[in-house]
Image (tube, helix red, strand yellow):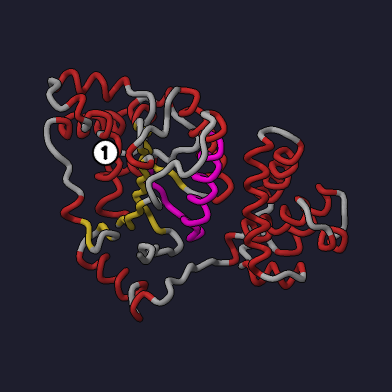
Amino acid sequence: MARSLRIKYEGAIYHITSRGNERRLIFKSDQDRFKFLKILKESLRIYNIILYSYVIMPNHFHFLLETPLANINEFMRQFNITYTYYYNKNYNRVGHLYQGRYKSIIVQKENYLNILSRYIHLNPVRVIKYQDSSYLEKEKHLKEFKWSSLKGYIDINQREPFIDYKTVLSDYGGDTKRGRKNYWKTLQSDIGSEIEMKKNIVGGCLLGDENFVKKIKEKYLSKKHKEIPSIRKIYNYCLTEDVIKIVCQEIGEDIESIKKGKGSKRQILMEMLYSYAGLKGSEIGKILDLDYSTVSVGRKRLRSKIAKDNDGDLSNLVRRIRNKLSIIKI
């Protein structure tokens, strides 16, 4: 069976969902949830993703996010691989953690961002366990639920630094006491009703009004879906020479020495040229005198090494380089 289509463009907003394989648990303890959020925070930073809302349920999760760099695939691959490695190692297991690929729906920002945020935040009381609970029980559970971004929407003292609250709250009176109160009031009224999303989704991947759906179809779903462009603008990235300079400085070797090596140092340069200079695998291959497939494999191996390294020398080196490159973005 062919893989489902992924539409990618700068500034695209997605509702992302992913379930455990055979609907099994993907979290067994609060330690797992804290680790999940730590990996999420790091992945958001690496790939410059804007996260608006999230919820962590026992066997699945929801994200509402924006991709300024049109890199949803790279972000989700890094994130899922890293958490899967942690989970498998922690519970002495092997194999897939998730049920197939993650599901993604392109969302129209103007009409559906604030609705989807509420839809995600209502998940904890939409489960069978609370099906027959009273309104007050549901309201209490929702307000006390720790594993979603809702707490920061209604209480400024419980905010997480990797969440963008202002954008959604702008539809409720702004990021003010009044705006937060309005958001919670609207959510309270949603508890006794039903926010129906599925019937409004077009083609299994688009959520928006008629004009939005038409625009996306015409721009990205033409020519029998042969190729969906991932538009990358240079002002979102560092200059190639600056990336090479900083990587060489931190590693302590010149570019020629790194090119001749076959280990982590060359893989780090591959990853930084991809993530911070916006270069494709073939372009990186030309710089390093490699085939593009070698670049892809090298970046994948680096992610695996970092996951295993935890907070060791390799992880710290990569973190230092990323911090320096984040400062000089143009």
Residue at the (44%, 41%) spot, across then down: 97
Does residue 242 appear left or right of residue 33 in this picture?
Answer: right
> Would you name the residue on which mark 1 appears?
118
Kind of residue indicated by mark 1: Arg
Residue at the (54%, 31%) spot, across then down: 92
Q: Quadrant of residue 293?
A: bottom right
Q: Is residue 70 magenta?
A: yes
Looking at the picture, how far across and down is residue 4, in whole percent? Answer: 35, 62
The quarter in which the C terminus is drawn is: bottom right
Looking at the picture, how far across and down is residue 178, in whole percent? Answer: 29, 30
Residue at the (65%, 69%) spot, across then down: 292
Range covered by the magenta-colored residues: 63-86
Q: Is residue 76 above or below residue 210?
A: above
Does residue 84 appear left or right of residue 315 in this picture?
Answer: left
Does residue 42 appear left or right of residue 242 in this picture?
Answer: left
Q: Is residue 125 above or below residue 258?
A: above
Q: Is residue 263 above or below residue 114?
A: below
Front residue of 68/102: it is: 102
Considering the whole magenta stretch, tell me its main secondary structure.
helix
Q: Is residue 149 visible?
A: no
Which residue is the extreme one toward the bottom? 223
Kindly state the secondary structure of the residue where label 1 is placed: helix
Q: Is residue 115 visible?
A: yes
The quarter in which the N terminus is drawn is: bottom left
Q: Quadrant of residue 29?
A: top left
Q: Is residue 311 magenta?
A: no
Looking at the picture, how far across and down is residue 86, in whole percent? Answer: 55, 35
Looking at the picture, how far across and down is residue 154, in whole percent? Answer: 33, 27
